[in-house]
Image (spheres, rainbow, N blue to C red):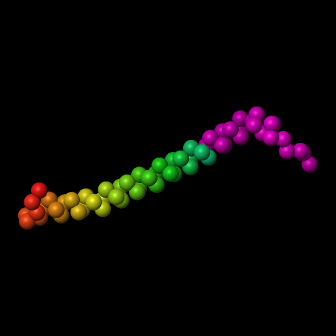
């Protein structure tokens, strides 16, 4: 069985490509989750703001 060598692994371009691809996809997923959270927050408070704007008894 071949001996595992970290130095040889770090020299391979396939290893670096795979590592960068995994890191990029994790960052993209985190960004998409953050955008979804921002949209749900905005949607929650836009409805409240619109109901206040349409209320004739509400004074600004």
Q: Residue at x 68, y 38 (%)?
A: 16
Q: Quadrant of the C terminus?
A: bottom left
Give the residues in magenta.
1-21
Where on the picture, by quarter, is residue 4? top right
Asked whether, in this view, residue 51 is left or right of residue 28, the answer is left
Residue that lies at the very extreme toward the left in this rendered image: 56
Query: Residue 13, percent across and down?
Result: 71, 35
Is residue 10 rendered magenta in the image? yes
Is residue 58 rendered magenta in the image? no
Asked whether, in this view, residue 4 is left or right of residue 35, the answer is right
Magenta portion: prevailing SS class:
helix
Query: Residue 52, percent across and down?
Result: 16, 62
Query: In the displayed structure, would residue 22 be above or below residue 50?
Result: above
Query: Residue 10, percent across and down?
Result: 75, 37
Query: In the displayed structure, would residue 52 be above or below residue 5?
Result: below
Query: Residue 1, percent across and down?
Result: 92, 48
Residue that lies at the very extreme toward the right in this rendered image: 1
Asked whether, in this view, residue 36 is left or right of residue 9, the answer is left
Query: In the displayed structure, would residue 37 be above or below residue 10?
Result: below
Q: Residue at x 66, y 43 (%)?
A: 18
Where on the picture, by quarter, is residue 6? top right
> How many numbered dots are placed on residues in this image?
0
Q: Residue at x 11, y 63 (%)?
A: 58
Residue that lies at the very extreme toward the front in this rendered image: 60
Asked whether, in this view, residue 46 is left or right of residue 35, the answer is left
């Amino acid at each position: 069985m071949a001996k595992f060598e970290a130095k040889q692994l770090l020299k391979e371009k396939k290893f670096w490509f795979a590592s960068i691809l995994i890191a990029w996809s994790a960052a993209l997923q985190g960004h998409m989750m953050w955008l979804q959270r921002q949209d749900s927050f905005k949607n929650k408070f836009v409805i409240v703001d619109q109901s206040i704007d349409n209320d004739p008894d509400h004074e600004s």
